[in-house]
Image (tube, rainbow, N blue to C red):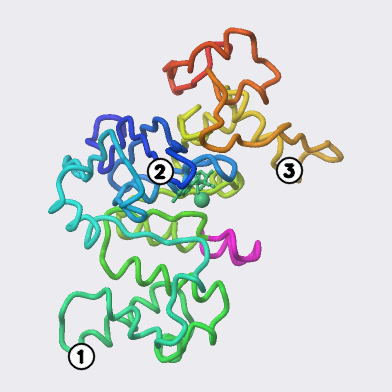
Amino acid sequence: MAETTPLLSIENLSVTFRTPGGLITPVPEVSLCVHPGERVALVGESGCGKSVTALSVTSLPPTDRAIRTGKILFKGCNLLEEPTALRETRRHGIAYVFQDPMASLNPVIRLSDQIGEVLPPMSKAARRERILSLLADVGLPDPVRAASAYPCELSGGQCQRVMLAMALAAEPQLLVADEPTTALDVTTQRKILGLMDRLARERQMALLLITHNLGIVASYMERLYVMYAGRIVESGSVKAVLSNPKHPYTRGLLAAVPSLKLERTQLQDIPGTVPPPGRFPPGCAFAPRCAFATADCSQAVPPLFVKEDRAVRCPNV
Ligand SMILES: Nc1ncnc2c1ncn2[C@@H]1O[C@H](COP(=O)(O)OP(=O)(O)O)[C@@H](O)[C@H]1O
Ligand SMILES: [Mg+2]
């Protein structure tokens, strides 16, 4: 995987927002890449900057309030500087699926018309056929009924399948799924993720899955980035990171995941909370919550130490 040119390469991206209270920088520096057809996860607690990073990839709003620096290379073009490449990437390169399907769909437009809007120009009959085939691909049992339905007539899981159909309609090379199953019940979560995984493999589409759920990462993803306070603190193959987490934050996240194998063990939460942007502590932002922190940790942001199968932003591991 390492030899192929990345499909998406985010290099030293920083995102600053103009707010009524002044400038805040929830993402000071993030770098990550996704290779063609690869399934990559970005994990971290709420407020770590995962969505800000994901939306920045295609410069999604609030554009007027966001200052983005660094590089976002998609198939070699820097989307932050090349508007034509950005337009083309939004149309055919990258599609998104978001957390709340009900909020993403228009409640007063039939689903066939909503999916039809994302399809390229074609005859009415071909459009109808394509819509039904997309709805069948995402596992809706009765595509004809779903096509003529309004969002409120379907369940949350079914609506997320429709969102997936809309994302696939553009035949993207990369699907960015931002907490796509957080609003769904656990059984439906598994089904949707299994479906997403199958569709990504069948279409050789790369997947960037954003989640705070390490359980689903273990089942479906190949590589993993762990984010804290707008920086990657650990990355590597899912197998390596989950079996031997090195950064104290990754260890904390894993210790908080329930396991059926470990009976009667107490789940360990990480003390404290993610600092809000503008109040990141000096040095390593995780230091105030870290059991292994030393005085040095608050002096400067540690670099990413790259060793064998891993990159870790901590000198003490
Ligand atoms: N448009 C915005 N303007 C100001 N602050 C924002 C904006 N979007 C997100 N933030 C802040 O950036 C931080 C990271 O947010 P987000 O990327 O949504 O976190 P995550 O997706 O990891 O839960 C949060 O503190 C959030 O309040
Ligand atoms: Mg988010």
Numbered circle sitting on residue 259: 3
Residue 223 in view (yes/no):
no
Q: Quadrant of residue 214?
A: top right
Tag in front: 1 or 3: 1
Against 44, residue 219 (above or below) is below
Whole-percent x, y for residue 196 in the image:
44, 60
Instruction: State the residue in front, 109 or 69.
Output: 69
Does the residue at mark 1 contact the one at mark 3 (Cβ under 8 Å)?
no
Which quadrant is home to the C terminus? top right
Whole-percent x, y for residue 26 in the image:
47, 38
Identify the secondary structure beneath mark 2.
strand
Q: Amino acid at mark 3?
A: Ser
Against 200, residue 67 (above or below) is above
Q: Amino acid at mark 2?
A: Phe
As drawn, the residue found furthest toward the right would be: 264
What whole-number distance in Å separates the C-alpha atoms at marks 1 and 2?
Answer: 43 Å
Numbered circle sitting on residue 124: 1
Q: Amino acid at mark 1?
A: Lys
